[in-house]
Image (cartoon, rainbow, N blue to C red):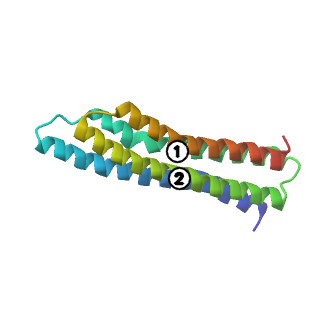
Amino acid sequence: MTPELAVAIGYASAIALSAFGSAIGTGMAGLTTIGAGKRCFLQQKPFPFITMAFVGAPLTQTIYGFLLMNAILGIAAKAGADGLGEAAAYSLMSGGFFGGLAIGMAAIMQGRAGAAASDALAETGKGFVNFMMILGVIESVALFVMIFIIVTLNKLVVGG
């Protein structure tokens, strides 16, 4: 495998796996929110629109994947002036793949938690702030992964 191909796999994986997780997470939360809304309508209760925040929460992981992808491209461009060796290219590939995977998994789990939060809020009308804090903790995993991988790849590949 050429260094260019390894870098391409890395940056494509960062965005693709993150977006894949976001799609699954929003789907999970969305399906449960639809069911919760149906229950509200059957019980002649107003459906809390705020549950849409739970559905949309996993979308931010796609942004983190995009930022990781751009960082990988930037690091490769910086290192490319001196020639990108195989070790550096494989580091960028691994960072993109495993970073995208971890970010995507955080999106999936955030979607599962958002689904439960949506169901609980629609049933009780209470707990929005508490539920958002739980989603925020899961969000932190994706942020930490993105930041730690970018910092580590900069040190490994560019030496900065």
- The residues tagged by marks 2 and 1 sit, at their Cα atoms, a distance apart of 7 Å
Residue at the far bottom in the pictured view: 1
Q: Locate the C terminus and report the quarter of the image it occupies.
A: top right
Which of the marked residues, 2 or 1, is nearer the chain's N terminus? 1
- Circle 2 Cα neighbour tier, 10 Å, few/some/many (<14 / 14–19 / ≥20): many
Q: Position of residue 86 (x, y in %)?
A: 82, 61
Residue at horizontal 10%, vertical 38%? 44
Up/down of 53 relative to 90, above or below: above
Above or below 135: residue 22: below
Q: In the picture, which quadrant includes the N terminus?
A: bottom right
In the image: residue 144, left or right of residue 120: right
Q: Quickly name the residue at label 1.
A: 61
5 relative position to 24: left or right:
right
The outermost residue toward the top is 129
Residue 36 location, x and y as percent? 23, 46
Q: Quadrant of residue 75?
A: top right
Image-based side of 48 in relation to 89, left or right: left
Determine the residue positioned at 83% across, 54% down. Answer: 84
Secondary structure beneath label 2 = helix
- The three-letter code of the residue at mark 2 reads Gly
On residue 19, the disc is none
Q: Residues within 10 Å of mark 1 (few under 14, many from 20)?
A: many
**Label annotation for residue 104:** 2
Please give the name of the residue rendered at 76% of the width and 46% of the height, measured from the top-left corner: 152
Circles 2 and 1 in contact, beta carbons < 8 Å: yes
